[in-house]
Image (cartoon, rainbow, N blue to C red):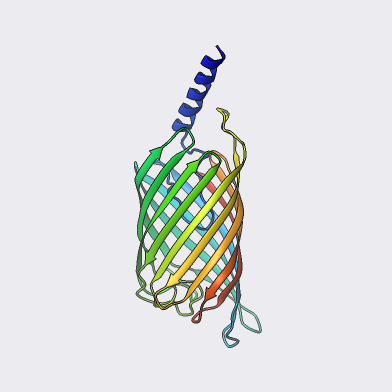
Amino acid sequence: MTSRWSTLGRGVLVATIASSPCPLLAQEAIWMPAATQPSPGQWILTEKVRYYDFRDDDPLDPVDSIVAAETTVAYGLIPRLSLQLDLPLLWQQSGTPSSTTFGLGDLSLALKWRVLQEDLGPVDTIRASVIGGTMVPTGTGGFGSTSVNPFIGIAATGIFGRHGLSAAASYRFTSGATFDPVFAGETNADLFRFEASYLFRLAPEEYTETHEAATYLVGEFLGEWETDGQSELFLAPGILWEAQRMALELSVRLPVAQQVTDRPKSAWALSVGVRLLF
């Protein structure tokens, strides 16, 4: 009898998770993309506030800090295909005496196509998605470029019990620089990104049919290389709380290697975010 009810309980758990409009198993990292996307007809709204602190070696053109309020909207078009829009609102503090610049950054439009989905159980899965899109020159206040810059990439995510692994790579073709480059990809050089993350589920140890929220420790490795030879490598520890329809995240990004000449070097960055499903 015990075995029978145990089997029945596992069946209920599998059915509940499979039918959930937004499984709490997504385990998206904080700074990099994952092979996750909304189901057809669903919206995911993500709001992130990121603070970037710089150490500029050029005293004639110092950039002290930037605050970016980044809005991301993802919509499920058909099974395995979703549309994503990203738009940053930027505040830049620079100069001595200090001055503040405010404006929009470039809009990013992308399609994400899931090319692999191998569900190994009610929790475990392996997924991969191809991502393609373009940056659109919507910048104001001196932010953004004056060109359309297409990009293509791939993201893969695996969930194995309490462990989550993700890897991603992308290439952006740059046809025009911003007026005063600050971030990678804002010069005339193309940008190659390579990223990886590991998430460990602190709680719960096992999922039940009650659909508990989950808390994760997050570790990310982030690499940026431009075709003019500039490069930066970062480590980003963080914490993620993820429920059925909402997620909260916090992370600090720290540089471990930098070869930058045409823009300021990053000292550190902080990201705080919330993700909502509709």
Q: Is residue 126 left or right of residue 93?
A: left
| Residue that sits furthest to the top in the current view | 1
Q: Position of residue 145 (x, y in %)?
A: 41, 74
Figure label count = 0
Q: Is residue 278 something one can see in this rendering?
A: no
- Give the image quarter of residue 250: bottom right
Hey, which residue is sitting farthest right in the picture?
Answer: 97
Q: Is residue 181 visible?
A: yes
Q: Position of residue 91 (x, y in %)?
A: 57, 70
Vertical order, 205 against 238 (above or below): above
* Quadrant location of the N terminus in the rendered image: top right
- Examine the rendered structure and indicate whether residue 171 appears above or below residue 8: below
Question: Would you say 266 lies left or right of 147 here?
Answer: right
Q: Is residue 96 left or right of residue 142?
A: right
> Of 97 and 208, which appears nearest the observer?
208
Q: Residue at x 56, y 76 (%)?
A: 265
Can you give x and y, in whole percent of width and height, for residue 36 in the image?
A: 44, 47
Q: Position of residue 8 (x, y in %)?
A: 50, 19
Which of the 4 image quadrants contains residue 270?
Answer: bottom right
Residue closer to the observer: 126 or 57: 126
Residue found at x 41% / y 77%? 177
Vertical relation: 231 (above or below) 79: below
The picture quadrant where one finds residue 269 is bottom right
* Residue at screen point 58% across, 52% down: 218
Residue furthest to the bottom in view is 60
The vertical placement of 120 against 262, above or below, is above
Front residue (pair 251, 255): 255
